[in-house]
Image: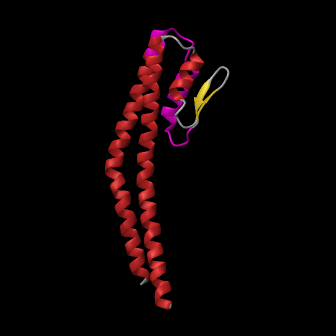
Amino acid sequence: MKLTVKAAGVVLVFLCFTLYGFFKSFSKKDYIKRLKKIDLALIKTENLLRQGNLNREGILKAAFSKVEGFNIYLDSAEIKNKDISDDLLLLLNTFLNDFGRNDTETELSSAEKVRQAVLEGIASKQEEYSTTGKLWRTAGICAGLAVGIMLI
């Protein structure tokens, strides 16, 4: 009985550490997916601007409806997402608040600048994920094994 409880505890500790490592790894990958959704929304915004058949609110709703944390108000729009870096979030929210107040060419160039910043963010996070994602998974497994062995 005592050995069974100890074995169950070791397995539980191993699983906890392993799951934590995988959680940290996949949270980095999830961040990349969020940025890719924003990139797609910016592409859709540019396309809808070029078509020119929707108003400001219609373009933003159509383009950003699948972006997590996107809100549109009477005279402004914003993205609230604690996972996106402050600099990128400020740039996105500035773009969204200024959207519809300039001519189409200015809007298109603004969207392209924001999109370039998002693409740079995606590239840097993919590089970070490729180096630290596997590290987190391996560290979780190793830490779980180490603590499990110490408990035996």
Q: Nearer the viewer, residue 105 or 49?
A: 49
Point 54% across, 14% down: residue: 54
Q: Is residue 136 above or below residue 16?
A: above
Q: Nearer the viewer, residue 86 or 136?
A: 136
Q: Is residue 148 above or below residue 23?
A: below
* 51 with respect to 56 (left or right): left
Q: Is residue 42 above or below residue 103?
A: below
Point 39% across, 79% down: residue: 149
Looking at this rendering, what residue extends furthest in the bottom direction? Answer: 1
* Residue 10 placement: quadrant: bottom left
Residue 77 position, x and y percent, is 60, 25
Residue 108 position, x and y percent, is 44, 15
Most prominent secondary structure in the magenta stretch? helix
Residue 36 position, x and y percent, is 42, 35
Residue 113 highlighted magenta (yes or no): no
Point 50% across, 25% down: residue: 63
Can residue 110 be seen here? The reply is no
Looking at this rendering, what residue extends furthest in the right direction? Answer: 74
Residue 5 position, x and y percent, is 50, 85
Q: Which residues are magenta?
A: 81-108
